[in-house]
């Protein structure tokens, strides 16, 4: 079993990565990811509340945020491969709220390495930002 939480979206968006990744998995094994993602695609430019400067000094939407994709995008990427069979593909209910609670907890204990994203997560309210979950089995052959 391979589990990736909050990192796969940085490298797994490459069309060829899944074929490399499954080499580390025994036949019949499982891959599971939970990644920050988009609950829906943007209808035009990135929404203003994601790009404006926050009181914390940071701007949420940076170039690395283009690695955030929708559930449909991730499902299509994995489903077109014959190497795995997708068993679960969904978004976490209240994912945006979980993300906000995490941000608040990190700030409260003084462990944030980046400007806080509390303001943008509150403004977003889970409309665009949340978590995508994918679980797949490697072909047994």
Image: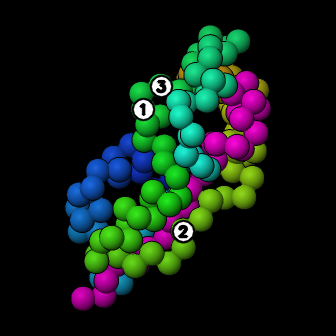
| Marks 1 & 3, CB-CB < 8 Å contact | yes
The Cα–Cα distance between marks 3 and 2, rounded to whole angstroms, is: 26 Å
Residue appearing at x 62%, y 17% in the figure:
52
User: Dividing the image into 4 quarters, which one contains the C terminus?
Assistant: bottom left
In front of the other: 38 or 28: 38
In front of the other: 33 or 72: 72
Q: Residue 96's quadrant in the figure?
A: top right
Residue appearing at x 45%, y 65% in the figure:
75
Query: Going from the N terminus, do you reach mark 1 or mark 2 first?
Result: 1
Residue appearing at x 29%, y 62% in the figure:
18
Q: Residue 54's quadrant in the figure?
A: top right
Q: Secondary structure at mark 2?
A: strand
The label number, if any, that marks residue 62 in the structure image: 3
Residue 12: % across, % down: 35, 52
The label number, if any, that marks residue 89 in the structure image: 2
Q: Secondary structure at mark 1?
A: helix
Q: Is residue 87 visible?
A: yes
Residue 35: % across, % down: 52, 51
């Amino acid at each position: 079993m391979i589990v990736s939480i909050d990192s796969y979206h940085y490298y797994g968006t490459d069309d060829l990565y899944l074929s490399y990744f499954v080499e580390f998995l025994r036949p019949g094994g499982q891959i599971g990811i939970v990644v920050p993602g988009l609950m829906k695609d943007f209808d035009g430019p990135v929404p203003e509340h994601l790009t404006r400067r926050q009181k914390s000094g940071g701007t949420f939407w940076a170039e690395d945020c283009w690695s955030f994709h929708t559930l449909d995008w991730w499902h299509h990427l994995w489903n077109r491969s014959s190497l795995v069979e997708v068993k679960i593909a969904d978004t976490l209910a209240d994912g945006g709220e979980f993300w906000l609670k995490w941000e608040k907890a990190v700030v409260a204990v003084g462990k944030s390495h980046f400007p806080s994203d509390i303001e943008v997560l509150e403004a977003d309210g889970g409309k665009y930002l949340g978590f995508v979950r994918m679980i797949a089995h490697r072909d047994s052959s």
